[in-house]
Amino acid sequence: MVGCWLNKPAKIRHLQIVMNGRRFVARWRKPVYLSLPVMTNFLAAEHQIQYVTNFEDLVNTPFEGAINAICYTRNLTGDFAEIVKKVKLNSQIAVVEPEELLALELSEQGHLARQIVLNDLQLLTAYGASPVLNLIRYYDRDDAYPFFPTDVYSYHVDHSPIPTNTFLCTYHGDASEILPNAQAEQKVLVPEIRAELKKLYGGADEGFESFLTEHFFDLHYRAKPGARPVNLGLGNLWRLAVEHPESKVLPCIHRAPVEATGQTRLLLIC
């Protein structure tokens, strides 16, 4: 439950918000002005996220209403950077198998990090998911259609013909981000982009929608002006809603980060 009464710009030094029984307080050294649009952007993101404190709640809490992202918040211990340094990476992205992790000679802090990763893999596998641990320098860019890239750096939703979820956790490097649905627009509905896609298609109108689906154009979004993406942070284990025939909520819009820091990412995903 969230309350907001900023009907016009207000001069404040701190702001307290209560969401799902949790209290958040933002403080500023000098007075600042906040208006309803600013608060609306913030609350739009928080309305979509359910925070939990254990793995059981992560996998069992249903998506409902506006909730399409569930976050198991964690402050992990251990040296994940040591794992990144010790694993041999001969390409821009590689799968790290549990056997390879176990073979690494690590310090005490590196061992703690390894145990956390292995435990996450085991929990998700027991749940019925198929987790993969990736070491990522960067992803391949889609340059087939420069005006409409469909790589993972573009805001997109995941699609499946059967009920499923997307799980992910960044242990090291830049974290992924999600975009509140209210702050996004489907790119195929933007008039100028749709016009370019029709030129690219060049066929009969009745086959256009199938063309968009076949090339995954319909899964991609762009941020509206003033949008405020949510960084998923390091160590948090997320469950995101996927577009599938039985889903009762909107799919969660997300994207991979551009590797601004130059750090190799250690990412669990399934």
Image: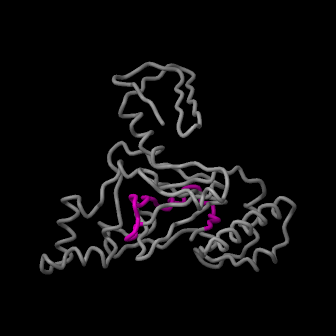
Residue 131 image point, x, y percent: 62, 73
In this view, 122 is above or below 261: below
Residue at 81 percent of width and 74 percent of height = 104
Residue at 40 percent of width and 40 percent of height = 41
Magenta stretch? 243-268
In this view, 75 is above or below 144: above
Residue 110 image point, x, y percent: 81, 62
- Tell me if residue 172 can be seen: no
Residue 4 image point, x, y percent: 42, 29
- Tell me if residue 205 can be seen: yes
Q: Residue furthest right?
A: 108
Does residue 54 appear left or right of residue 48 in this picture?
right
Q: Quadrant of residue 157?
A: bottom left
Frontmost residue, 115 versus 142:
115
In this view, 57 is above or below 128: above
Q: Is residue 237 magenta?
A: no
Q: How many marks?
A: 0
Residue at 31 percent of width and 67 percent of height = 148
Q: Residue furthest left?
A: 204
In this view, 233 is above or below 25: below
Q: Quadrant of residue 16?
A: top right
Give the main secondary structure of the magenta stretch. Answer: loop
Quarter of the figure that contains the C terminus: bottom right
Frontmost residue, 102 versus 16:
16
Render colour scheme: one colour
Does residue 99 appear left or right of residue 55 in this picture?
right
Residue 125 image point, x, y percent: 65, 74
